[in-house]
Amino acid sequence: MPSSILTNNGAMVALQSLQMTQKNLQETQNRISTGLKVATAKDNAATWSVATSMRADIANLKQVNEVLSVSSGVVTTAATGTQNVADLISKIREAVTSVQDGVKSAKTVQASIDAYLGQIKSIVDSSSFKGVNLLNGSTSGDTKLLASVNSNGGAQTPAYITVGAQNLTMGTGGSLNVLQGFSVAGVVNKWAYSAPTATSTSAGSQLEVGDSLTFSFTLNGANKTATFTNSTAATLNMSNVDDVATVMAGIRDAINTTAGTSNQIASLDTMGRLVVDNTKGTDTIAFNGASALAIGIDSGTAITLGTATNLAPQAPKYMYAKPTGTPTASTVYDFSFNINGSDVAASYTVPSGTTSYDTVMTGVMNAINAKAGVGNSIASLDAAGNLVVDASKGKDAIAFDGATALKTQGGSLGASGAVAQKYTYTTLAALTAAAVTGDTLTFALNVNGADKSYTVSVDTLVAGSARGGAALGDYAASAAGGDALITDLATYINTLGYGSIASNGGSGATTALVIDSKNAPLGVDVRGGVSTAGITKTGTVAFAAISGNTGGNSGTTTSQVEFDFSNTQVAGDVLKFSFTQGGATKTAQVTVGATQTKAETLRALAKAINTAAGASVAAVRGDVTAEKLYVDGTRASSAVTFSSTYTNDLTGVTHASANPMTTNNQTVVSDTSYAGLLSVLKTAETAVLSAGAAFGAAQVRVDTQKDFIGKLADTLTTGVGALVDADMSEEAARLTALQTQQQLGTQALSIANQAPQSILSLFRG
């Protein structure tokens, strides 16, 4: 190799070798410090892309695992709730069995059962995890719990675990509604039946051979019918004392035979009446006293059953269902009842901000008990939160009509709004042709909603004019002629019986006929033409211009308001109208009568308003079947003011949902036989266990999926590590080797750099 002082090939080679060694050393040191052999895309683009995608999948799987942890909490909470409910149903069964010894008080045991039922309601309502409750019916349909996110061909698809929500409430639609009214207490049925009577004195008024009477009842929940049939050879005449006695004894014996030897519930009293008393039997017997005794076969249709008398009437007991949704503030609940012969009413107003009907039902309950007085806690809430009013719980004599006792007040009777008082026929300009005998004017008025057309001759207008010395010549072709004509037309309109409603609203070129209904009688709604053209003419007379002659309504005030009456009212509803007069708040109130028409009810309310105001400010007006209440507060000497858009003051009353717990004085609870009660509990238990099994299965699946997702994330993490993690042993050995190479390369470069000095030595002396 030639020697050169300009080019040091050895140094160049040594430098390149050293640079490569340093580069490899830097890469090795990076791998050791990061632990990755592929840290960025430049390290290995393909491997980096795969690893980055897998890391994203792993992160998402870990989030799914967290979601499954929450889902596990939701399902576990529901499963725990069903288990506790099942345990309480078991306790209720034990309580029912305990009372069968005939010694324990059914009333005492029932108190324990009621406490268990209340606890069931509490558990169902509180079995919520982060706001999700799968037991109380608040979650409709199935609940989808995220189980995983599956990748297939680049597409990602979520997978779910479906859990069916349950409704274990005791209300309507709930799986445990069979427990509503669950009771171990028996029901007293004791009725007396007078003997059948003949419809006439003819021979047909008899129980002929083959005719029969029947008595229907239930025995331990099973339907039974006792039948007495006239099987004698002769007819039994209901006009004959002996024959009547035979019939009454026959139906008595038939009832006792059908009920069994341990249930001799039928007898005859000293008046010969049939008396049926279910307390005389050892089994559970119930019947509808008013209709239990019936005619089976009466070929002559000539006898009539006697009077059925309840010998053990029970106090009314009604359940009022708790509404759903959100309560409306200011809604008023009224409960009417009679205590010791006096009519009273309890009232509760929903406060603003109330969000739950539980609060409302509690408020109504407290209002009723407060009104009933000490010792008369007749109102309570059942396990489902429904209001139950039981008059038998009071120490005083309490009665009420369960179907109509509870009412709510709130809402509007219908549309309302200020009434346009003035109707103006605008710009009836100067006459361009004078009026002559025989000319006519035709105009329209709207009276109580109906258009009416009136035609009057100019001769009649002159004759009835209030202007002194009026003559037909006054209607000349001039501005003054038009002014005179409209003035006399207004005078004529005021003679039609609608009061002084018309006037000339201008003069000359701006003459205008004005109809102002505020001057009409209170009960008359009269306005200018609405659907009919305002003013037309026949004959010679002519106006220069009648622009806008159909006119327009104006002059509305909030003191003159019309109220529609579109909502249907029923007997007993209360209508209220509140207003302010002289700084005092007043209320007019009427109760809808049993046979009142809409118009009659409105007239009664108008009369009440006028009485309260001390002036005629209210009336009913409008076409038949379209009557409206009209209130004009300006007609009182002391002005009456009120709201023109009623939402609460003018109140429409609706009946609350009332479910009678009495039918013909027979309390409708549950079948109180031991077998019947066990059957009810079995139905409830089956529903709870079915729900619990579903939640348990879902719980196992959620936990299994959670464990799988955790392991899958670990497996993928291991796979990513195999792709990108550095082998630290290998990197340590490589680091040592590269460090040695770096030292050797540095020495080689140093030696190569000394070569030019060797060449210079050749020239020294």
Image (cartoon, rainbow, N blue to C red):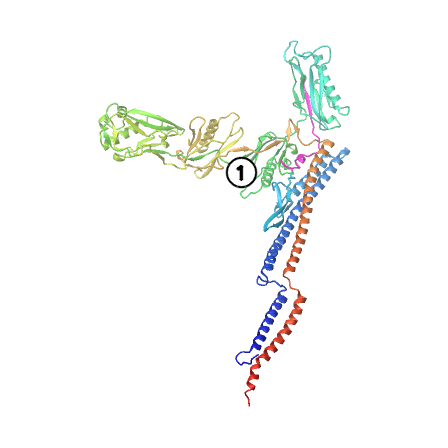
Q: Which residue is mark 1?
A: 331
Residue 401, compared with residue 687, is above or below; it is above
Q: Judge left or right: residue 523 versus residue 167.
A: left
Between 230 and 464, which is closer to the camera in this rendering? Answer: 230
**Quarter where residue 274 is shown:** top right
Quarter placement of the N terminus: bottom right
Tell me the SS state at disc 1: loop
Image x and y of residue 61, in percent: 63, 53
Image x and y of residue 522, in percent: 40, 30
Residue 471 appears in the figure: no
Residue 720, compared with residue 606, is above or below; it is below
**Quarter where residue 321 is shown:** top right
Image x and y of residue 565, in percent: 47, 31
Residue 276 appears in the figure: yes
**Quarter where residue 122 is shown:** top right
Disc 1 marks a residue whose amino acid type is Thr
Q: Main secondary structure of the magenta part?
A: loop
Give the magenta range.
170-194
Looking at this view, name the residue that lies furthest to the bottom: 765
Label 1 neighbour load within 10 Å: few <14, some 14-19, many 20+: some
Looking at this view, name the residue that lies furthest to the front: 1
Quarter placement of the C terminus: bottom right
Between 199 and 682, which is closer to the camera in this rendering? Answer: 682
Verify whether residue 172 appears in magenta: yes
Number of numbered tags placed on the structure image: 1
Between 127 and 724, which is closer to the camera in this rendering? Answer: 724
Residue 748, compared with residue 84, is above or below; it is below
Image x and y of residue 179, in percent: 67, 36
Verify whether residue 85 appears in magenta: no
Between 134 and 294, which is closer to the camera in this rendering? Answer: 134
Looking at this view, name the residue that lies furthest to the top: 203
